[in-house]
Image (tube, helix red, strand yellow):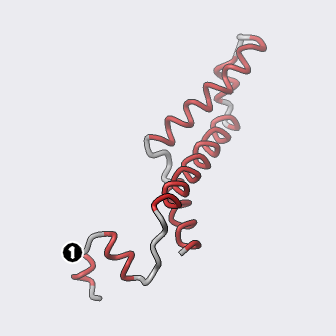
Amino acid sequence: MNIASLALSKPSEISRSNNQPEVSPERDAALRKKAAEFESIFITEMLSHAGFDKALSENSGHGGEAFSRMLVESYAEQLSDKGGFGLADQIYRQLKGELS
């Protein structure tokens, strides 16, 4: 397969040309979900270590500390759902490649 034919090919045709077996749709969806969950947890930890949760709970008492953690988790999920840092895509590709 030459470069010109790759440029005109659809992504699904390129992956099949690498002789990788297809992953079932159910397994594919599960891989994507787990990769997105991992990215969300990773973003939560990054924001927490950066002090975002402490900044949100400043002068708010014990209830504010618990609430700020939930708020950071919610922000992380939203960031991940909107594309995040691309980590979920990389994890998905790695897992799919290992299963193929």
Name the residue tied to disc 1.
8
Q: Residues within 10 Å of mark 1 (few under 14, many from 20)?
A: few
Q: Position of residue 87 (x, y in %)?
A: 53, 54
Look at the picture and state if 96 lies above or below 6. above
- Depth check: 74 or 98 in front? 98
- Depth check: 19 or 25 in front? 25
Q: Residue at x 49, y 60 (%)?
A: 28
Left-right relation of 42 to 80: right
Q: Residue at x 70, y 16 (%)?
A: 58
Q: Position of residue 30 (x, y in %)?
A: 54, 54
Q: Which quadrant of the rendered structure holds the N terminus? A: bottom left
Q: Residue furthest right?
A: 62
Q: Position of residue 99 (x, y in %)?
A: 57, 72
Left-right relation of 92 to 9: right
Q: Secondary structure at mark 1?
A: helix
Look at the picture and state if 61 lies above or below 23. above
Q: Position of residue 52 (x, y in %)?
A: 64, 29
Q: Residue at x 74, y 13 (%)?
A: 63
Look at the picture and state if 11 lies above or below 64. below
Q: Residue at x 55, y 67 (%)?
A: 94
Type of the residue with mark 1: Leu
